[in-house]
Image (cartoon, rainbow, N blue to C red):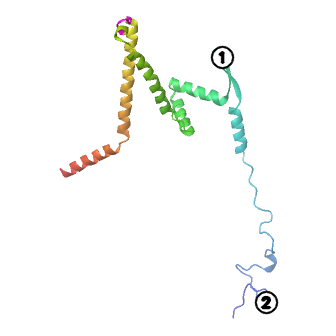
């Protein structure tokens, strides 16, 4: 019969792998790491976040012509971004679309809505002109009316072109079915 290595009698206990000497064993209630784990240094992220927010929430005087407004840095930065976007800055355009995506704002839909609200007002004014009013227009007024109609025509052509490109870029199920049927016809012939 082999002796039990975990028995408490001194003669039968063998010291070896998995069987440390009795003197070096942990006592009941004693931790294996009395000093505990090393503490991590405190993070500076909360401090940086607070500094970042306080810097952008500072107020400043914004002059626009004769008017002077007190706005936050955030508001001034967004106005400047919108101004640069309107001037055609490609970086501002990229940033504006990134912010719109992050904030959940649909710039294109709101712009389309604003355009649709503006166009009917212009077109109803044109439609309300009677034959007598058209005949009484001066040459300059007729040129202005012609220029407006030309701009509307160009806008309509651009919108149709964008719609056509969008449909070509993202094939719908009908286009996929047509392509599949044409591929089947080629295989059959």
Residue contact at pointers 1 and 2, CB within 8 angstroms? no
Question: Above or below — where is 111 with respect to 39?
Answer: above
Question: In the orientation shown, which residue stands out farthest toward the left?
Answer: 189
The answer to whether residue 10 is left or right of residue 122 is right
Say whether residue 137 is magenta.
yes
Residue 123 image point, x, y percent: 41, 20
* Number of on-image labels: 2
**Dot 2: what SS?**
loop
Q: Which of marks 1 and 2 is in front?
A: 1
Residue 185 image point, x, y percent: 21, 48
Quarter where residue 28 is shown? bottom right
Residue 29 image point, x, y percent: 81, 72
Which badge, 1 or 2, is on the more N-terminal residue?
A: 2
User: What quarter of the picture does the N terminus occupy?
Assistant: bottom right
Please give the name of the residue rendered at 73% of the width and 42% of the height, measured from the top-left corner: 47
Please give the name of the residue rendered at 43% of the width and 19% of the height, measured from the top-left corner: 122
- Magenta segment boundaries in residue numbering: 134-138
Question: Above or below — where is 157 with respect to 66?
Answer: below
Please give the name of the residue rendered at 56% of the width and 36% of the height, measured from the top-left corner: 99
Residue named by callout 1: 67
Residue named by callout 2: 11
Quarter where residue 33 is shown? bottom right
The answer to whether residue 18 is left or right of residue 146 is right
Structural crowding at the residue carrying mark 1, measured as other residues with C-alpha within 10 Å and reported as few (<14), some (14–19) or many (≥20): few
**Prevailing SS of the magenta stretch:** loop
The answer to whether residue 81 is left or right of residue 37 is left
Quarter where residue 83 is shown? top right
Question: Above or below — where is 163 with respect to 137?
Answer: below
């Amino acid at each position: 019969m082999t002796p039990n290595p975990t028995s408490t009698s001194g003669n039968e206990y063998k010291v070896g792998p998995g069987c440390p000497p009795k003197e070096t064993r942990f006592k009941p209630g004693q931790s294996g790491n009395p000093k505990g784990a090393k503490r991590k240094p405190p993070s500076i992220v909360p401090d940086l976040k607070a500094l970042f927010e306080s810097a952008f929430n500072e107020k400043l005087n914004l002059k626009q012509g004769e008017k002077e407004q007190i706005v936050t840095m955030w508001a001034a930065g967004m106005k400047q971004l919108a101004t640069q976007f309107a001037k055609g800055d490609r970086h501002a355009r990229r940033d504006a679309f990134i912010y719109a995506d992050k904030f959940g704002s649909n710039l294109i839909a709101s712009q389309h809505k604003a355009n649709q609200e503006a166009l009917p007002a212009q077109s109803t004014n044109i439609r309300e002109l009677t034959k007598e009013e058209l005949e009484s227009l001066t040459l300059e007024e007729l040129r202005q009316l012609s220029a407006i109609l030309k701009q509307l025509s160009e806008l309509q052509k651009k919108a149709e072109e964008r719609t056509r490109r969008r449909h070509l870029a993202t094939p719908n199920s009908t286009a996929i079915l047509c392509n599949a049927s044409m591929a089947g016809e080629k295989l059959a012939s």
